[in-house]
Amino acid sequence: MGHSGDASLNLPNVYNKFKACANGDNVLLPEYCEAYTEVSKLLVYFGNLFYFVTSDVNHKISELRDLYAADKINYKSVEQMAVYEEKQNEHLPVKKRKCVGSRTLLRLHRALLFVIDLMQEVCRGKLRTPPDEQLKVIARSVYDKTLSQYHPWPIRKAVGVAVYALPTQEHLVHHIVQSQPPGSGLLTNEQCAEFLTSHALPVMRKFCFTTVHNEVRYIDVTNLLSSSLTLFIRLQHYILLCLQSLLDFACLIWLHDYGNLLRLVH
């Protein structure tokens, strides 16, 4: 079991695509999907152990793309989407309101903050823990501060197990350096870390907070609540994804199939 797609995180692409999202004070939705797809490659690198997170992100990006494809006027930008969905719901009871695009965007931002904070901590590299434990400690700490508060109990427990099978921080950094395109000038760990901390991560973080706090300001928090049935279906989906990853992991250990175990991890 290996990667399901390209896991090469191209740092100049990340920076350029997030800059391309901006249109004055607005954010273009199709360009946002392109930028996020580039960032999601980091999750692909972690393999099946983070499948339940990666799958959720990919599904939500597809949802936004489908909304834009169906209505290129009202879903051209984040602000237009928010205004349109607010008008669609202003006369409906709370329980019947639907803000599909805005809710999806908000949930994608939660995962984006996880990636931003994770890479920020990796670039700092100041942990006193053993080298082979550093990424595990960072990933668990960042997850607890970001995504965990939005995930049901089965997902939180699954992540707690999954982090122990993550690659080393050295392996992750090496992978990122090797993924940079020729001519980018990003040839060393230090150069990649400098580019991330000085260019890519600040643009991503600014974009994320600007969108959440300014451009989705029209959406009432109550509009983001799903119905009980929707929550139940989502919980079932999460549980199945967790069980799939954990059972794969447990079976490979039981069979002493360490070759496939490494492919599952990486």
Image: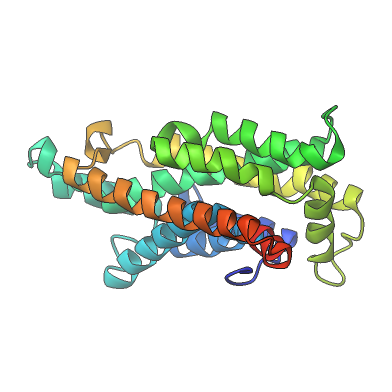
Residue at figure coordinates x 63%, y 31% from the top left: 141
35 vs 154, left or right, is right
Give above or below for 187 relative to 130.
below
127 vs 41, left or right, is right
Residue at figure coordinates x 91%, y 60% from the top left: 187
Question: Residue 246: horizontal and vertical position, in percent?
Answer: 52, 52
Question: Residue 114: horizontal and vertical position, in percent?
Answer: 58, 41
Q: Nearer the viewer, residue 112 or 53?
A: 53
- Residue 151 visible: no
Question: Residue 76: horizontal and vertical position, in percent?
Answer: 37, 62
Residue at figure coordinates x 22%, y 48% from the top left: 230
* Residue 130 quadrant: top right
Image quarter of the C terminus: bottom right
Residue at figure coordinates x 57%, y 37% from the top left: 160
- Residue 108 visible: yes
Q: Nearer the viewer, residue 114 or 70?
A: 114
Q: Nearer the viewer, residue 192 or 90?
A: 192
The residue lying furthest to the front in this view is 255
2 vs 259, left or right, is left
* Residue 213 quadrant: top left
Question: Residue 120: horizontal and vertical position, in percent?
Answer: 72, 38
* Residue 64 quadrant: bottom left
| Image coloring type | rainbow
Image quarter of the N terminus: bottom right
Give above or below for 129 relative to 230.
above
Give above or below for 3 relative to 221.
below
